[in-house]
Image (spheres, rainbow, N blue to C red):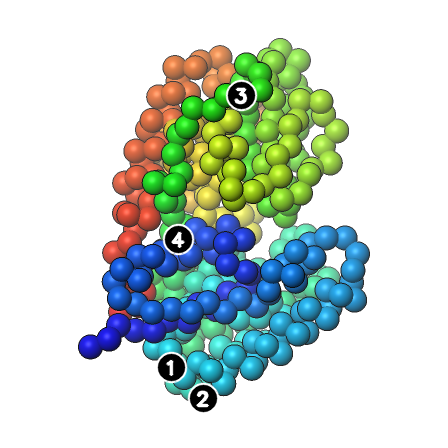
Amino acid sequence: MSKKQILFVCPYPTDEAPSQRFRFEQYFEILKSYGYKYDIAPFLNIKAWNILYKNGSSIQKSIWILLSYFKRIALLFFIRKYDRIFIHREASPIGPAFFEWFSVKVLKKKIIYDFDDAIWLDDPNEKGSLKAILKWKRKVRSICKWSYKVSAGNQYLADYAKRYNQNVIINPTTIDTGYHENKVIQKENEKITIGWTGTHSTLQYLSPLIPILDQLNQKYDFELLIISNQKPDFNVNYIRFIKWSKTSEIEDLNQIDIGIMPLSDDIWSKGKCGFKMLQYMSINKAVIASPVGVNQKILEESNAGIIASNDSEWINGLKKLLDNNDLRNELGKRGRKYIQNHYSVKSNTENFLKLFD
């Protein structure tokens, strides 16, 4: 008997967006090894992706969105051959869940619905805007109801999904520890490097930490390395920026000595899956992070980092790590071991495959 055929329906082109890469794309070879066949149907092609987050080009962006939307609707005529439809976040970023409804109610397909953020809530940066209205956030609960299974990134997200669907699997964002590994890097200088990585949309969480780093910089000679798809506008002289690149991401991350993950304590942030912290820990880096959402669970279970819930704890925690190289090394070792046991592709493979039973 042949294995199931899976269609992955996702927002972004393959190998571009972290949420896709680390939630399902890195399992593709494993799926093949188990005999599964799959295809990928991103909403945006690479041309649309490359202009979407740049300033200007509003007309061109609108044209691409419309073309992508019509292409998504046309896809409905070609999905009969698939046994499972894996939908990451949503089939379309605008409008109601027509694709999902038609797939389930008309074509009788089994949907696996995957999300790793509190996407049923308005993004704080977009609340009340036309963009927020077009996103049609209330469709999330409907898709949960219609789904065969729901894949949630953490317990907070799973609790929401269980209001509408009892077949929920906590499928954490995971790290390929064979790819993410500690490497000896020749740094540009001997300064201790405090590092942060993430997309431009999450730079907002780093901003409140700048005054604290300004204060510490008066005593300690360190640099703040920011790895992102967009250069921040922080006006401080100790920042070094590296534009994110998949080809160099491991070498770039390995320049970090202390990984930081500040978050605001709100209902949106509680849905975060701790990915920045998982990346740092996977390559033996000491971490300090806000105890928001799954961050607290990871820090308490791993004993591989420092919890910082206010300015004083951030200052004292960073001082402790800046002053003590042995502590940084020990925390880094604990973090790597914890990731291997709990948040690696290998440790989560059996759980991931249950989604397709």
**198 sits to left or right of 285:** right
| First along the sequence among labels 2 and 4 | 4
How far is the residue under mark 2 from the one under mark 4?
31 Å
- Quarter of the image where one finds residue 81: bottom left
| Residue found at x 50% / y 82% | 76
Q: Which residue is mark 1?
A: 81
| First along the sequence among labels 1 and 2 | 1
Q: CB of mark 1 within 8 Å of CB of mark 2?
A: no
Q: Which residue is mark 4?
A: 26
Q: Which residue is mark 3?
A: 187
Residue 21 drawn at (x, y percent): 46, 53
Three-letter amino acid code of the residue under disc 4: Gln
**76 sits to left or right of 330:** right
How far is the residue under mark 3 from the one under mark 1?
52 Å
| Residue found at x 27% / y 40% | 341
| Residue found at x 61% / y 22% | 223
Please name whichever residue, 322 or 61, is drawn nearer the observer in this view of the structure: 61
Binning the other alpha carbons within 10 Å of mark 4 as few (below 14), some (14 to 19) or many (20 upward) gives: some
Residue 130 drawn at (x, y percent): 73, 66
Of labels 2 and 4, the one closer to you: 4
| Residue found at x 45% / y 88% | 106
Q: Which residue is mark 2?
A: 106
